[in-house]
Image (cartoon, grey):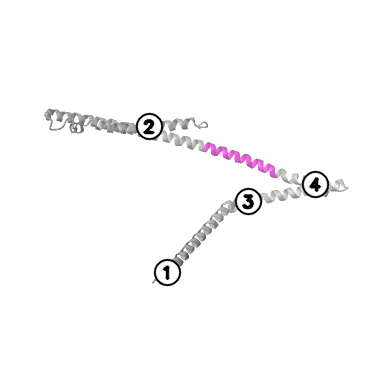
Amino acid sequence: MFDSSFQRSGVYFKTLQILRIFAQVIQRTRRDVELLNPEVSLSAPVLPLTSPDSDPTEDNMLQANWDILWGFYLEKEDHLLKRITNKTEEVKSLRDGLFNATSLREASRSTTMNRYVIVFTVMTVLYLPPSLVASVFGTELFTTDDNGETVTRFKVATVVTSISTYALGVFLIWIADRLDLPGILWERVTDWWQRTFNRATKWYGRSNWREDILASRKRAEDATSSA
């Protein structure tokens, strides 16, 4: 069902190209068959209609046979073109279904990867405050002679920093989910860009308008001075 190696996609593409070539060949064959029309043959300079060798009965019979042949050809041509069109639609539907299934599979994989990223992010956030406190207390700034007091400070700092970080993270996630901060930010950025573009366009138009006025005034002054 899925096409990880793109083999089925290649098969569908080749099939569509072959069907397109078949349709073009059939259409070109129709022009070749039209050259066999007795009206075209009898009107040729080699055998003019006024030739003494021409027989009206034979010409009429030839025309009747041509009408039968031409009708048979049109019937078969229409049948083949319809079959090619139907096969083309079937292959296109299979190709679109394959693309949709592959897209759904890729979307599922992306969702799974996003979940993995979320898990690793949560684990990183969980271990970040204790690591930060341990790094800070590893310096000589918080070293005291009483080891018990140092351990107590370390415990208090670890608990306070962890709780503060977790609470702030949950609050920011809640705010972003309720207010749709990315959407609001994108809307404000696009609105600012649109307003800036409009102002630049107006300024450019005004500058061109001023230049046109100055040019017209200069032409008028030149005309007056020359007069």
Report the mark closest to the observer, 4 or 2.
2
Helix, strand or loop for disc 1: helix
Q: Amino acid at mark 1?
A: Asp
Chief secondary structure of the magenta span? helix
At 42% from the left and 69% from the top, the residue drawn is: 222
Helix, strand or loop for disc 2: helix
Q: Which residues are magenta?
A: 104-125
Instruction: Assign the C terminus to one quadrant of the image.
Output: bottom left
Task: Please state the horizontal and vertical placement of residue 140, each as a whole percent of the image.
Answer: 83, 47
Helix, strand or loop for disc 4: helix
- Within 10 Å of the Cα at label 3, are there few (<14), some (14-19), or many (20+) other Cα atoms? few
At 70% from the left and 44% from the top, the residue drawn is: 126
For marks 4 and 2, the one nearer the N-term is 2
Work out whether residue 177 or residue 58 is closer to the camera in this orientation and state it: 58
At 28% from the left and 30% from the top, the residue drawn is: 76
Tally of numbered tags = 4
Q: Amino acid at mark 4?
A: Phe
Task: Tell me the residue that label 4 is attached to.
Answer: 137
In the image, 124: left or right of 92? right
For marks 1 and 3, the one nearer the N-term is 3
Magenta stretch contains residue 12: no
Kindly check if marks 4 and 2 are in contact, taking CB atoms under 8 A apart as contact. Answer: no
- Within 10 Å of the Cα at label 4, are there few (<14), some (14-19), or many (20+) other Cα atoms? some
Magenta stretch contains residue 108: yes
Task: Tell me the residue that label 1 is attached to.
Answer: 222
In the image, 218: left or right of 48? right
Work out whether residue 47 or residue 161 is closer to the camera in this orientation and state it: 47
- The disc label shown at residue 19, or none: 2
Task: Tell me the residue that label 3 is attached to.
Answer: 174
Marks 2 and 1, Cα distance to the nearest angstrom?
Answer: 72 Å
